[in-house]
Image (spheres, rainbow, N blue to C red):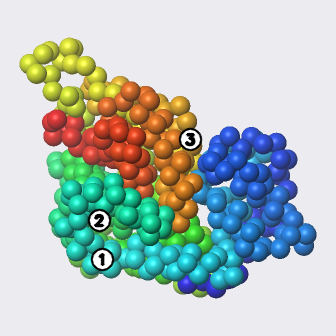
Amino acid sequence: MVSSNSGPAPASGPSATDPCVHCGFCLPTCASYRVLGTEMDSPRGRIHALKAIEAGELVLDATVASHFDSCLGCLACVTACPSGVRYDLLIEATRPKLNAPELRSSGQQALRKLLFALLPYPGRLRALLTPLRLYAGTPLQNLVRRSGLLRLVGPQLEAIEGLLPPLAPEAFADRFPLVVPAQGPRRYRVGLVLGCVQRLFDPAVNQAAVAVLSANGIEVVIPPAQGCCGAMTHHQGELEQTQTLAQQLVASFAAVVGPGKAAGPEPLDAVLVGASGCGHTLKHYPEILGGEGAPAARGSEQPFQAPVADIQEFLAQVGLSEAFRSALQPLRHGDGEPASAIRPLRLVYHDACHMLHGQGIHDQPRDLLAQIPHVQLLEAVEAGVCCGSAGIYNLVEPEVAAELGRIKAGDLAATGAELAVSANIGCSLQIRKHLGEIGRELPVLHPVQVLEQSFNGP
């Protein structure tokens, strides 16, 4: 773990707060301000604090640090800012300083150490979850949740258990071959990052991703030794651990792709990822691996030797194959009725923050879903507001996250949709949890799962 104030200086320099004119356009978009309603828990207030700290007028103590910890890092304020303030760079430079031991309680530090020791390591997480297969998704779990016993232990433990889904057998082993061939003429060759939480808590997403890519004439390389991309630690300012995880992931691809390697000598056209939080970090690998502590990678523009793209971004760019597109079927059975009589299935797409604000991906997922026959795409009223997941935020700041989850679930349900679509595992878990709490039976699927179901038939 990184020490209290270690890490590179802010890439934006000491004057990065100068463009802020304190106009307040960021306030309605800020998730923490939405719940807490205090100036210090808004981007504008935090920038005020940073200016005061730089001027020596304010000390970064535990109270001040708590207002930075309340930030979800959703980046909505960056999108909203008319002055172009790079709050994303400001908060990224501040995060490592918040890890100083005197700025958090011993309990907060212990929880973070536990999460960072478990969640980025699929092997460790699988070992922990194996005995819970007899509990997750069973009537016992429902009974424990209704009893409120976990609330007595602590809100953090209750939040962790509340996100635990039924555990599929596929979650406990990666059963993909090294190379999944393209169906029909090969159009492209890509690598696939499986993610750590996604492959355990929703393994059907990766299965659908491989199936959709292959059916579109895209060969998929899946390094078997790959681990976490480092997104979770990256978003929390744990620079040293992030660099280590990033180096290991890059090495797992280099070990199997290239001359004399098991996956063949041909280069990859792209490295794809199906979780927006991971994609945001992967696209920052040149900065992460070019920083302090990683001199061998310094200056490398593409550590994977291929561009990183979200799977939806890539499919929208290269286009669905004619064979795949022509095979897409309505997601609802017509029961013998002509196609023109089939009622459209109403879908609402949830914009994950690190997809929308972090990567600027908005139209591509909608364009892909719109190619499915007889779907009606609906929009949430506050599509750009965070759902409260935000990496580990819903585990370390459970009260604020829960309120945001309830707002998001209500917003999605109010559209009248019959299916919610989300491209980030943390968002999906958060939305499912809070939809259940408000009593709405609204399934949540990844876009590639929806495409796969349409291709294979409802």
Report x, y in % for residue 420: 36, 39
Q: Residue at x 12, y 16 (%)?
A: 337
Q: Which amino acid is tagged 2?
A: Leu
Report x, y in % for residue 304: 43, 69
Q: Earlier in the sequence, mark 2 or mark 3?
A: 2
Q: Distance between the residues labelled 2 and 3?
A: 27 Å
Q: Up-down: is 116 above or below 326? A: below
Q: Earlier in the sequence, mark 3 or mark 1?
A: 1
Secondary structure under tag 2 reads helix
- Per the image, the residue denoted by label 3 is 384
Whether residue 272 is visible, yes or no, is no
Q: Up-down: is 334 above or below 118? A: above
Q: Distance between the residues labelled 1 and 2?
A: 11 Å
Report x, y in % for residue 434: 41, 47
Q: Which amino acid is tagged 1?
A: Leu
Q: In the rendered image, which quarter is residue 117 located in? A: bottom left
Q: Which residue is drawn at 24% across and 51% down?
A: 208
- Per the image, the residue denoted by label 1 is 128
Secondary structure under tag 3 reads loop
Front residue of this view, candidates 264 and 131: 131
Task: Decide if residue 116 is on the left or right side of residue 131.
Answer: right
- Per the image, the residue denoted by label 2 is 200
Whether residue 36 is visible, yes or no, is yes
Q: Distance between the residues labelled 3 and 1?
A: 35 Å
Quadrant assignment for the N terminus: bottom right
